[in-house]
């Protein structure tokens, strides 16, 4: 999916003026008693408080979700958050890309005119996701662990097997994957220790104490330990539990509006949404989808990889992360400067929105240091052989 014709009226440009997230915690861990609406509602309330928005002024709530039970989760969470019944909700499912695509959709709607205000993002409670089943001819239930993403003749490998296929096809070695994963953990540990996550996290009630921090980053990882992990998905392969992400519960959301409305709301800074692209690829190499989406996006925006100041890629697997970044000409060492999903975890439908929240936090810090505009790229690969990417520019208003 590509953006429509460029917005020629600067006042109608879509912008993101606030972004927040929950702690990202291992599935069946500290947040296992929270349903998806219970994860998301506190983030929506916190965004309203941070921006001073009247809840009745929200035009729509657009939320991505991958493994929920249906029933329009966005509407449910909006009411759970205390928004009035006059505020509608729309739930988006593009699997792992759902959160980023929800933000892209809100941005396109904002650009269409009328100066609307949207709450957009994603949420996943893997811990409380309903069991899913197909009905047999006799009426019995055949339970399954994951959906079928494409017709069988296209090939529909499990995620880990697909990550191994990407490693082979793009020549990503075990050593490269382990090195990248270890760096992700070390960066996330340092970022947490220096308070770089604190301003973007909405604390949640947990079992006993409040949950205020991500629980995934491991300071104890060392190269020798990484080397001990066996292949996890293909005998003799290079993809292991150590260079793969873990499943997580999380929610993240942003406020999207037009530039004109942002100024009337008193916003002092914003992420201008320059464009978004979604691309399809061979489902057998689904992990490379983000690379092709980003390649198309940068070409259409007339931006080269060396112009990017910040890049956030959802690190489902180190193999696909390296392959996608190298495909668009980005040195993997220069992306995900404060760690990614290999350390923090992958909350499926929430992960794309987490990328934007992380980028806004980093862009603010970088602008404070340099005083210049910041160009940022968010990118995520998607089950079924797809990828979504968004190009963002941070500016002071």
Image (cartoon, rainbow, N blue to C red):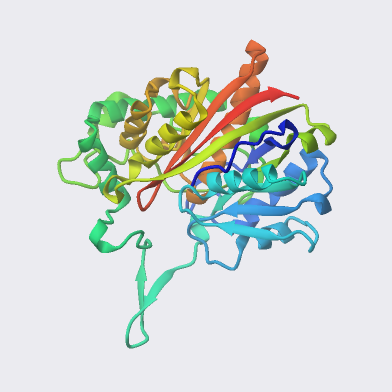
Q: Residue at x 56, y 28 (%)?
A: 192
Q: Determine if residue 394 is in view.
A: yes
Q: Determine if residue 34 is in view.
A: no
Q: Position of residue 283 (x, y in %)?
A: 30, 50
Along the viewing direction, whichever of 321 and 106 lies nearer the viewer? 106
Q: Residue at x 63, y 59 (%)?
A: 90
Tell me if 152 is positioned left or right of 29 in this view. left
Q: Position of residue 2 (x, y in %)?
A: 51, 43
Along the viewing direction, whichever of 115 and 322 lies nearer the viewer? 115
Along the viewing direction, whichever of 371 and 242 lies nearer the viewer? 371
Q: Position of residue 276 (x, y in %)?
A: 53, 39
Q: Looking at the picture, does residue 150 appear above or below residue 121?
A: below
Q: Residue at x 38, y 51 (%)?
A: 383
Q: Position of residue 162 (x, y in %)?
A: 27, 46
Determine the image quadrant of residue 328. top left
Determine the image quadrant of residue 366. top right
């Amino acid at each position: 999916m590509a953006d429509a014709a460029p917005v020629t009226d600067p006042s109608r440009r879509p912008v993101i003026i606030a972004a927040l997230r929950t702690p990202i915690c291992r599935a069946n861990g500290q947040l296992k008693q929270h349903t998806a609406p219970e994860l998301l509602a506190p983030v929506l309330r916190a965004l309203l408080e941070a921006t001073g928005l009247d809840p009745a002024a929200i035009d729509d709530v657009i939320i991505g979700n991958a493994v929920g039970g249906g029933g329009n989760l966005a509407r449910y969470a909006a009411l759970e958050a205390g928004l009035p019944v006059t505020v509608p909700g729309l739930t988006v499912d593009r699997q792992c890309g759902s959160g980023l695509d929800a933000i892209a959709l809100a941005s396109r709607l904002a650009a269409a005119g009328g100066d609307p205000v949207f709450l957009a993002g994603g949420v996943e409670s893997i811990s409380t996701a309903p069991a899913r089943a197909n009905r047999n001819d006799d009426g019995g239930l055949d339970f399954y662990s994951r959906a079928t993403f494409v017709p069988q003749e296209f090939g529909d490998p499990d995620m880990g097997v697909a990550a191994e296929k990407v490693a082979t096809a793009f020549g990503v070695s075990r050593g490269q994957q382990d090195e990248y994963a270890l760096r992700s953990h070390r960066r996330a540990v340092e970022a947490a220790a220096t308070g770089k996550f604190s301003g973007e996290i909405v604390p949640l009630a947990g079992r006993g104490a409040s949950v205020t921090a991500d629980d995934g980053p491991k300071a104890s990882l060392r190269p020798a330990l990484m080397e001990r992990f066996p292949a996890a998905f293909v005998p003799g392969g290079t993809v292991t539990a150590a260079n793969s992400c873990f499943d997580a519960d999380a929610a993240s959301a942003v406020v999207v509006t037009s530039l004109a409305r942002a100024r009337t709301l008193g916003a002092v800074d914003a992420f201008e949404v320059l464009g978004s692209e979604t691309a399809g690829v061979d489902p057998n190499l689904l992990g490379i989808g983000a690379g092709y989406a980003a390649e198309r996006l940068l070409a259409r925006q007339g931006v080269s990889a060396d112009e990017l100041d910040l890049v956030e890629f959802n690190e489902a697997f180190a193999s696909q992360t390296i392959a996608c970044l190298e495909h668009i000409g980005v040195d993997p060492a220069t992306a995900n400067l404060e760690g990614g999903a290999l350390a923090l975890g992958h909350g499926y439908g929430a992960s794309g929105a987490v990328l934007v929240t992380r980028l806004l936090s980093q862009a603010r810090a970088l602008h404070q240091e340099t005083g210049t505009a910041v160009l940022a790229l968010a990118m995520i690969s998607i089950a079924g052989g797809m990828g979504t990417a968004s190009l963002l520019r941070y500016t002071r208003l």
